[in-house]
Amino acid sequence: MKRRQFAALAGATLAAPAVFAQNRTTRILVGFAPGGSADVIARLMTEKMSASLGQNVIVDNKPGAAGRLVLGELKRAAPDGQTLVLSPSGALVIAPWLYNNLPYDPIKDFTPVARVVTFDFAVTVGPGAPKGDLKTVLAWMKENPSKANYATSGAGTVPHFAGLMLSQAAGVPLTHVAYKGGAPAAQDLIGGQIPLMVDTASETIEHHRAGKVRILAVTGAHRSKSLPDVPTLKEQGIDMEAEAFFGLYGPAGMQPDVVARIDRAVAEALKDPAIQEKIYGYGLVPAYAPSSELAVTQAAHLKRWEAPIKASGFRPE
Protein backbone atom coordinates (compact mmCIF):
# COMPACT_ATOMS: atom_id res chain seq x y z
CA MET A 1 0.00 0.00 0.00
CA LYS A 2 2.78 2.42 0.95
CA ARG A 3 4.62 1.69 -2.29
CA ARG A 4 1.44 2.44 -4.29
CA GLN A 5 0.84 5.66 -2.34
CA PHE A 6 4.44 6.77 -2.87
CA ALA A 7 4.26 6.00 -6.59
CA ALA A 8 1.02 7.96 -6.91
CA LEU A 9 2.49 10.90 -5.03
CA ALA A 10 5.65 10.85 -7.16
CA GLY A 11 3.57 10.71 -10.33
CA ALA A 12 1.47 13.68 -9.22
CA THR A 13 4.60 15.64 -8.36
CA LEU A 14 6.17 14.98 -11.75
CA ALA A 15 2.94 15.84 -13.55
CA ALA A 16 2.43 19.14 -11.74
CA PRO A 17 4.85 21.28 -13.81
CA ALA A 18 3.27 20.10 -17.07
CA VAL A 19 -0.22 20.93 -15.85
CA PHE A 20 1.02 24.28 -14.57
CA ALA A 21 2.69 25.08 -17.91
CA GLN A 22 -0.49 24.32 -19.83
CA ASN A 23 -2.33 26.90 -17.75
CA ARG A 24 0.21 29.63 -18.42
CA THR A 25 0.32 32.05 -21.32
CA THR A 26 3.40 33.20 -23.17
CA ARG A 27 3.14 36.72 -24.55
CA ILE A 28 5.00 37.77 -27.66
CA LEU A 29 5.18 41.54 -27.43
CA VAL A 30 5.12 43.43 -30.72
CA GLY A 31 6.09 47.09 -30.64
CA PHE A 32 4.01 48.05 -33.66
CA ALA A 33 0.35 48.35 -34.61
CA PRO A 34 -1.69 45.29 -35.70
CA GLY A 35 -1.39 44.52 -39.39
CA GLY A 36 2.29 45.40 -39.70
CA SER A 37 5.00 42.91 -40.60
CA ALA A 38 6.10 42.16 -37.01
CA ASP A 39 2.48 41.53 -36.01
CA VAL A 40 1.82 39.31 -39.04
CA ILE A 41 4.90 37.15 -38.47
CA ALA A 42 4.22 36.75 -34.74
CA ARG A 43 0.63 35.68 -35.38
CA LEU A 44 1.67 33.16 -38.02
CA MET A 45 3.80 31.36 -35.43
CA THR A 46 1.53 31.38 -32.38
CA GLU A 47 -0.62 28.32 -33.15
CA LYS A 48 2.35 26.05 -33.88
CA MET A 49 4.29 27.41 -30.92
CA SER A 50 1.31 26.85 -28.62
CA ALA A 51 1.18 23.22 -29.70
CA SER A 52 4.93 22.73 -29.26
CA LEU A 53 5.10 24.42 -25.86
CA GLY A 54 1.86 22.97 -24.52
CA GLN A 55 0.53 26.36 -23.47
CA ASN A 56 -1.13 29.41 -24.95
CA VAL A 57 1.05 31.78 -26.97
CA ILE A 58 -0.53 35.15 -27.76
CA VAL A 59 0.52 38.37 -29.48
CA ASP A 60 0.36 41.56 -27.42
CA ASN A 61 0.65 44.75 -29.52
CA LYS A 62 2.19 47.73 -27.75
CA PRO A 63 3.16 50.23 -30.45
CA GLY A 64 5.45 53.14 -29.77
CA ALA A 65 8.99 54.47 -30.10
CA ALA A 66 9.76 52.25 -33.11
CA GLY A 67 9.74 49.10 -31.02
CA ARG A 68 11.87 50.42 -28.17
CA LEU A 69 9.03 50.58 -25.62
CA VAL A 70 8.41 46.84 -25.64
CA LEU A 71 12.14 46.18 -25.27
CA GLY A 72 12.08 48.34 -22.15
CA GLU A 73 9.21 46.20 -20.86
CA LEU A 74 11.06 43.02 -21.79
CA LYS A 75 14.11 44.15 -19.83
CA ARG A 76 11.94 44.36 -16.69
CA ALA A 77 10.19 41.01 -17.24
CA ALA A 78 10.95 37.82 -15.34
CA PRO A 79 13.35 35.55 -17.28
CA ASP A 80 10.91 32.63 -17.22
CA GLY A 81 10.11 32.49 -20.93
CA GLN A 82 6.60 33.84 -20.48
CA THR A 83 7.41 37.28 -21.93
CA LEU A 84 9.16 37.56 -25.29
CA VAL A 85 9.55 40.22 -27.96
CA LEU A 86 9.59 39.75 -31.71
CA SER A 87 11.83 42.65 -32.58
CA PRO A 88 12.95 44.11 -35.88
CA SER A 89 16.69 44.53 -35.93
CA GLY A 90 16.46 48.33 -35.95
CA ALA A 91 15.62 48.64 -32.27
CA LEU A 92 18.73 46.60 -31.44
CA VAL A 93 21.28 47.70 -34.05
CA ILE A 94 20.16 51.20 -35.07
CA ALA A 95 18.87 52.70 -31.80
CA PRO A 96 22.17 52.24 -29.90
CA TRP A 97 23.88 54.65 -32.34
CA LEU A 98 21.11 57.24 -31.97
CA TYR A 99 20.16 57.51 -28.31
CA ASN A 100 22.62 58.43 -25.59
CA ASN A 101 20.16 57.42 -22.88
CA LEU A 102 18.65 54.29 -24.42
CA PRO A 103 16.78 52.54 -21.56
CA TYR A 104 18.30 49.15 -22.38
CA ASP A 105 21.57 47.62 -23.46
CA PRO A 106 20.92 45.65 -26.68
CA ILE A 107 23.48 43.00 -25.76
CA LYS A 108 23.43 42.73 -21.97
CA ASP A 109 19.69 43.12 -21.26
CA PHE A 110 18.28 40.43 -23.56
CA THR A 111 18.59 36.77 -24.38
CA PRO A 112 18.57 35.98 -28.11
CA VAL A 113 16.17 33.07 -28.65
CA ALA A 114 15.89 32.56 -32.42
CA ARG A 115 16.13 34.43 -35.69
CA VAL A 116 12.80 34.23 -37.50
CA VAL A 117 12.99 36.00 -40.86
CA THR A 118 15.29 38.14 -42.96
CA PHE A 119 14.17 40.77 -45.41
CA ASP A 120 15.03 43.78 -47.47
CA PHE A 121 12.82 46.79 -48.12
CA ALA A 122 10.39 47.86 -50.79
CA VAL A 123 10.35 51.34 -52.31
CA THR A 124 6.66 51.87 -52.97
CA VAL A 125 4.74 54.76 -54.51
CA GLY A 126 1.05 55.56 -54.33
CA PRO A 127 -1.37 57.71 -56.34
CA GLY A 128 0.31 60.83 -54.97
CA ALA A 129 3.35 60.12 -57.16
CA PRO A 130 3.56 60.40 -60.96
CA LYS A 131 3.44 57.38 -63.26
CA GLY A 132 6.72 55.91 -64.41
CA ASP A 133 9.73 54.14 -62.95
CA LEU A 134 11.64 55.04 -59.80
CA LYS A 135 13.98 57.47 -61.58
CA THR A 136 10.93 59.33 -62.94
CA VAL A 137 9.45 59.62 -59.46
CA LEU A 138 12.73 60.76 -57.92
CA ALA A 139 13.20 63.37 -60.67
CA TRP A 140 9.69 64.69 -59.93
CA MET A 141 10.51 64.87 -56.23
CA LYS A 142 13.68 66.79 -56.97
CA GLU A 143 11.65 69.31 -58.97
CA ASN A 144 8.97 69.46 -56.25
CA PRO A 145 10.83 69.49 -52.93
CA SER A 146 7.68 70.25 -50.92
CA LYS A 147 6.33 66.86 -52.04
CA ALA A 148 9.58 64.93 -51.61
CA ASN A 149 8.44 62.98 -48.54
CA TYR A 150 8.74 59.31 -47.69
CA ALA A 151 6.91 57.30 -45.04
CA THR A 152 8.20 54.54 -42.77
CA SER A 153 6.92 52.61 -39.78
CA GLY A 154 8.83 54.83 -37.38
CA ALA A 155 11.76 57.16 -36.69
CA GLY A 156 15.03 55.45 -35.87
CA THR A 157 14.09 52.26 -37.72
CA VAL A 158 16.09 50.52 -40.43
CA PRO A 159 13.56 51.71 -43.08
CA HIS A 160 14.13 55.28 -41.87
CA PHE A 161 17.87 55.00 -42.57
CA ALA A 162 17.32 53.00 -45.73
CA GLY A 163 15.32 56.00 -46.95
CA LEU A 164 18.12 58.39 -46.00
CA MET A 165 20.61 56.17 -47.81
CA LEU A 166 18.34 56.17 -50.86
CA SER A 167 18.14 59.95 -50.70
CA GLN A 168 21.93 60.26 -50.59
CA ALA A 169 22.61 57.61 -53.23
CA ALA A 170 20.05 59.10 -55.65
CA GLY A 171 21.04 62.72 -54.96
CA VAL A 172 17.46 63.70 -54.13
CA PRO A 173 16.67 65.37 -50.77
CA LEU A 174 13.87 63.36 -49.15
CA THR A 175 12.03 64.28 -45.95
CA HIS A 176 11.18 61.46 -43.56
CA VAL A 177 7.64 61.12 -42.17
CA ALA A 178 7.43 58.63 -39.29
CA TYR A 179 4.28 56.63 -38.53
CA LYS A 180 3.40 54.35 -35.63
CA GLY A 181 3.63 51.23 -37.74
CA GLY A 182 3.69 50.22 -41.37
CA ALA A 183 -0.06 49.69 -41.72
CA PRO A 184 -1.07 53.32 -41.03
CA ALA A 185 1.76 54.52 -43.27
CA ALA A 186 0.50 52.30 -46.09
CA GLN A 187 -3.02 53.67 -45.69
CA ASP A 188 -1.79 57.23 -46.17
CA LEU A 189 0.25 56.06 -49.17
CA ILE A 190 -2.88 54.53 -50.72
CA GLY A 191 -4.86 57.67 -49.92
CA GLY A 192 -2.34 59.90 -51.69
CA GLN A 193 -1.38 61.81 -48.52
CA ILE A 194 2.25 60.81 -49.02
CA PRO A 195 3.85 59.83 -52.36
CA LEU A 196 6.52 57.30 -51.38
CA MET A 197 7.14 54.70 -48.69
CA VAL A 198 10.24 52.74 -47.71
CA ASP A 199 9.48 49.74 -45.52
CA THR A 200 9.19 45.98 -45.51
CA ALA A 201 7.44 44.63 -48.59
CA SER A 202 4.86 43.02 -46.32
CA GLU A 203 3.40 46.46 -45.63
CA THR A 204 2.49 47.12 -49.27
CA ILE A 205 2.75 43.88 -51.25
CA GLU A 206 -0.98 43.06 -51.19
CA HIS A 207 -1.84 46.64 -52.17
CA HIS A 208 0.75 46.34 -54.96
CA ARG A 209 -0.91 43.17 -56.21
CA ALA A 210 -4.29 44.88 -56.07
CA GLY A 211 -3.00 47.81 -58.13
CA LYS A 212 -3.48 50.38 -55.35
CA VAL A 213 0.25 51.14 -55.08
CA ARG A 214 3.38 50.27 -57.08
CA ILE A 215 6.53 48.69 -55.66
CA LEU A 216 9.27 50.13 -57.86
CA ALA A 217 12.40 48.69 -56.24
CA VAL A 218 13.75 46.42 -53.52
CA THR A 219 16.83 47.25 -51.47
CA GLY A 220 18.46 43.82 -51.31
CA ALA A 221 21.44 42.51 -53.23
CA HIS A 222 19.11 40.30 -55.27
CA ARG A 223 15.51 40.39 -56.44
CA SER A 224 12.91 39.17 -53.98
CA LYS A 225 11.40 35.72 -54.48
CA SER A 226 8.05 37.32 -53.67
CA LEU A 227 8.53 40.12 -56.23
CA PRO A 228 10.59 38.62 -59.06
CA ASP A 229 9.56 41.32 -61.54
CA VAL A 230 10.67 44.19 -59.31
CA PRO A 231 14.30 45.30 -59.89
CA THR A 232 16.79 46.08 -57.15
CA LEU A 233 18.03 49.63 -56.66
CA LYS A 234 21.42 48.66 -58.09
CA GLU A 235 19.76 47.38 -61.23
CA GLN A 236 18.33 50.88 -61.63
CA GLY A 237 21.66 52.61 -61.20
CA ILE A 238 21.29 53.53 -57.52
CA ASP A 239 24.24 52.19 -55.54
CA MET A 240 22.60 51.19 -52.29
CA GLU A 241 21.67 48.03 -50.33
CA ALA A 242 19.85 47.54 -47.03
CA GLU A 243 18.70 44.36 -45.32
CA ALA A 244 17.40 43.45 -41.86
CA PHE A 245 15.92 40.66 -39.74
CA PHE A 246 13.32 39.86 -37.09
CA GLY A 247 14.51 38.06 -33.97
CA LEU A 248 12.74 36.59 -30.96
CA TYR A 249 14.22 37.74 -27.66
CA GLY A 250 13.66 37.16 -23.97
CA PRO A 251 14.96 38.99 -20.89
CA ALA A 252 18.55 38.52 -19.77
CA GLY A 253 19.13 35.57 -17.47
CA MET A 254 16.90 32.99 -19.14
CA GLN A 255 17.90 29.42 -18.37
CA PRO A 256 19.43 27.54 -21.34
CA ASP A 257 16.76 24.82 -21.20
CA VAL A 258 13.99 27.44 -21.39
CA VAL A 259 15.69 29.12 -24.35
CA ALA A 260 16.16 25.77 -26.08
CA ARG A 261 12.51 24.84 -25.59
CA ILE A 262 11.25 28.07 -27.17
CA ASP A 263 13.92 27.88 -29.87
CA ARG A 264 12.66 24.41 -30.87
CA ALA A 265 9.08 25.71 -31.00
CA VAL A 266 10.12 28.50 -33.38
CA ALA A 267 12.06 26.04 -35.54
CA GLU A 268 9.05 23.72 -35.75
CA ALA A 269 6.74 26.59 -36.70
CA LEU A 270 9.07 27.78 -39.46
CA LYS A 271 9.35 24.27 -40.92
CA ASP A 272 5.64 24.33 -41.75
CA PRO A 273 5.31 24.73 -45.56
CA ALA A 274 2.07 26.70 -45.16
CA ILE A 275 3.76 29.20 -42.82
CA GLN A 276 6.77 29.45 -45.14
CA GLU A 277 4.49 30.15 -48.10
CA LYS A 278 2.70 32.91 -46.19
CA ILE A 279 5.98 34.47 -45.10
CA TYR A 280 7.23 34.53 -48.69
CA GLY A 281 3.86 35.96 -49.69
CA TYR A 282 4.53 38.96 -47.45
CA GLY A 283 7.84 39.66 -49.13
CA LEU A 284 9.89 38.21 -46.27
CA VAL A 285 12.22 35.20 -46.11
CA PRO A 286 11.78 32.46 -43.48
CA ALA A 287 15.29 32.22 -42.05
CA TYR A 288 15.30 30.32 -38.76
CA ALA A 289 18.59 30.36 -36.89
CA PRO A 290 19.26 29.33 -33.26
CA SER A 291 20.08 31.59 -30.35
CA SER A 292 23.86 31.57 -30.86
CA GLU A 293 23.57 32.49 -34.55
CA LEU A 294 21.09 35.28 -33.80
CA ALA A 295 23.62 36.77 -31.37
CA VAL A 296 26.32 36.72 -34.07
CA THR A 297 23.96 38.25 -36.66
CA GLN A 298 22.95 41.01 -34.26
CA ALA A 299 26.56 41.90 -33.50
CA ALA A 300 27.43 42.03 -37.22
CA HIS A 301 24.48 44.31 -38.04
CA LEU A 302 25.30 46.56 -35.07
CA LYS A 303 28.79 47.10 -36.49
CA ARG A 304 27.54 47.47 -40.08
CA TRP A 305 25.14 50.34 -39.32
CA GLU A 306 27.49 52.47 -37.22
CA ALA A 307 29.16 54.31 -40.11
CA PRO A 308 26.02 55.07 -42.21
CA ILE A 309 24.13 56.41 -39.20
CA LYS A 310 26.98 58.63 -38.05
CA ALA A 311 27.51 59.85 -41.60
CA SER A 312 23.82 60.75 -41.94
CA GLY A 313 24.08 63.32 -39.15
CA PHE A 314 20.58 62.39 -37.97
CA ARG A 315 19.79 62.82 -34.30
CA PRO A 316 16.36 62.12 -32.79
CA GLU A 317 14.48 65.10 -31.43
Image (cartoon, rainbow, N blue to C red):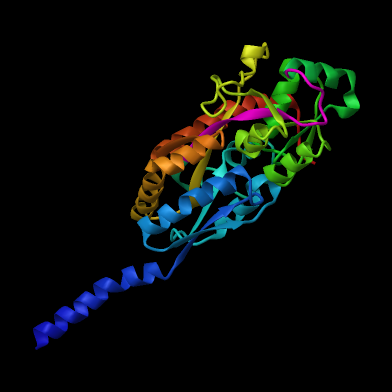
Task: Residue 61: give x, y in percent of width and height.
Answer: 62, 56
Q: Nearer the viewer, residue 246 or 156?
A: 246
Residue 27, above or below 200: below
Q: Residue at x 55, y 32 (%)?
A: 119
**Residue 48 in the figure: left or right of residue 315:** left
The magenta-colored residue range is 116-133
Q: Which residue is at the far front?
A: 210
Q: Quadrant of the C terminus?
A: top right
Q: Quadrant of residue 312?
A: top right
Q: Residue at x 46, y 50 (%)?
A: 45
User: Does residue 3 appear in the picture of this structure?
Assistant: yes
Q: Which residue is at the far top?
A: 237
Q: Is residue 1 magenta?
A: no
**Residue 48 in the figure: left or right of residue 214:** left
Q: Nearer the viewer, residue 136 or 179?
A: 136
Q: Quadrant of the N terminus?
A: bottom left
Residue 151, above or below 218: below
Q: Quadrant of residue 127?
A: top right
Q: Is residue 131 magenta?
A: yes
**Residue 299 in the figure: left or right of residue 166:** left
Task: Residue 64: give x, y in percent of width and height.
Answer: 69, 51
Q: Residue at x 67, y 37 (%)?
A: 207
Task: Residue 70: give x, y in percent of width and height.
Answer: 61, 53
Q: Nearer the viewer, residue 232 or 91?
A: 232
User: Does residue 158 appear in the picture of this structure?
Assistant: no
Residue 177, above or below 138: below
